[in-house]
């Protein structure tokens, strides 16, 4: 059964009025309709879908639906594996080894550990100027790299193979897996992102997705649709 989520962009005042007005009405259902469409109202435009650059709630909301990181929250708000099939932590609590599950990008490319390495390096890269780079400072050498004291290749992340992603930390971080539910730590398809250049994440067809939905349509300042 095809599921579609459509967002329309409206003012906050109109959203409030609309919800109050609809509270007294019953919604008609069409049981014979096999395509389920959920229509929602959003209060603004999506600034970007580049996960290492976004800082706003609207972009985060969309990314949470079209992308998937190593972990996610369950319906009970528990941190559970998502892109990670399983993981191990070293005895000193400073090295995390993630085994990735089999998954594909929306263009058919496999999601690999290299996609995480690329994304995390872009998050820390001072040229990216990510406002959320600091949340990765627990990763080995991240802060020094972001402050241009070390080169990007000194970041404590590596792809042991296509399905094994290894992260070294500066010190033990008991809540580290909780941090990894944030969109800033999502993978990015390196080859595709480099092909798009500065246009990456600025149109529905200028990004690839590895989550439960894809952004199928994006009418700027009007609406966007996820399928």
Image: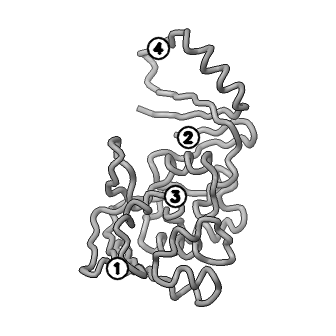
Disc 1 and disc 3: Cα gap in Å?
22 Å
Q: Residue at x 28, y 81 (%)?
A: 92
- Where is residue 157, by image quadrant? bottom left
Kindly identify which residue carries mark 4. 29
**Mark 1 or 3: the one toward you:** 1
Give the residue at mark 1: 94
Give whichever of discs 1 and 4 has the lower sequence position. 4
Tag 1 secondary structure: loop
**The N terminus sits in image quarter:** top left
Give the mark, 3 or 4, whose residue is nearer the N terminus. Answer: 4
Disc nearer the start of the sequence (1/2): 1
Describe the element under mark 3 as helix, strand or loop: helix
Mark before the other along the chain sequence, 1 or 3 = 1
**Numbered circle sitting on residue 106:** none
Instruction: State the image coordinates of residue 227 (x, y, percent, origin top left).
Output: 52, 40
- Horizontal and vertical percent position of residue 126: 66, 78
Q: CA distance from mark 2 to mark 4?
A: 21 Å
Q: Are marks 1 and 4 in contact (CB under 8 Å)?
A: no
- Separation of residues labelled 1 and 4 (CA atoms): 53 Å
As drawn, the label of residue 226 is: 2
User: Which residue is labeled 3 in the image?
Assistant: 183
Circle 2: element type:
strand
How packed mark 3 is, by other alpha carbons closer than 10 Å (few <14, some 14-19, many 20 or more), is many
Which marked residue is nearer to the observer: mark 1 or mark 2? 1
- Kindly check if marks 1 and 3 are in contact, taking CB atoms under 8 A apart as contact: no
């Amino acid at each position: 059964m095809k599921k579609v989520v459509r967002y329309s962009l409206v003012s906050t005042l109109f959203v409030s009025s609309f919800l109050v007005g609809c509270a007294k009405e019953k919604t008609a259902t069409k049981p014979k309709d096999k395509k389920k469409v959920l229509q929602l109202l959003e209060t603004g435009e999506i600034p970007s879908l580049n996960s290492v650059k976004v800082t706003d709630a609207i972009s985060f909301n969309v990314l949470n639906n079209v992308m998937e990181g190593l972990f996610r929250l369950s319906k009970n708000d528990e941190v559970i594996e998502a892109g990670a099939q399983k993981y191990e932590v070293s005895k000193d609590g400073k090295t995390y080894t993630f085994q990735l599950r089999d998954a594909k990008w929306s263009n058919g490319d496999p999601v690999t550990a290299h996609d995480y390495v690329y994304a995390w390096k872009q998050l820390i890269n001072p040229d990216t100027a990510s406002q959320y780079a600091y949340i990765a400072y627990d990763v080995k050498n991240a802060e020094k790299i972001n402050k241009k004291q070390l080169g990007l290749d000194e970041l404590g992340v590596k792809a042991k193979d296509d399905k094994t992603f290894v992260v070294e930390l500066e010190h033990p971080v008991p809540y580290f897996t909780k941090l990894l539910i944030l969109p800033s730590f999502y993978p990015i398809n390196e080859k595709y992102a480099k092909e798009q250049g500065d246009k990456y994440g600025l149109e529905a067809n200028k990004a690839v997705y590895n989550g439960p939905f894809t952004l199928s349509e994006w009418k700027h300042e009007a609406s966007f649709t996820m399928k």
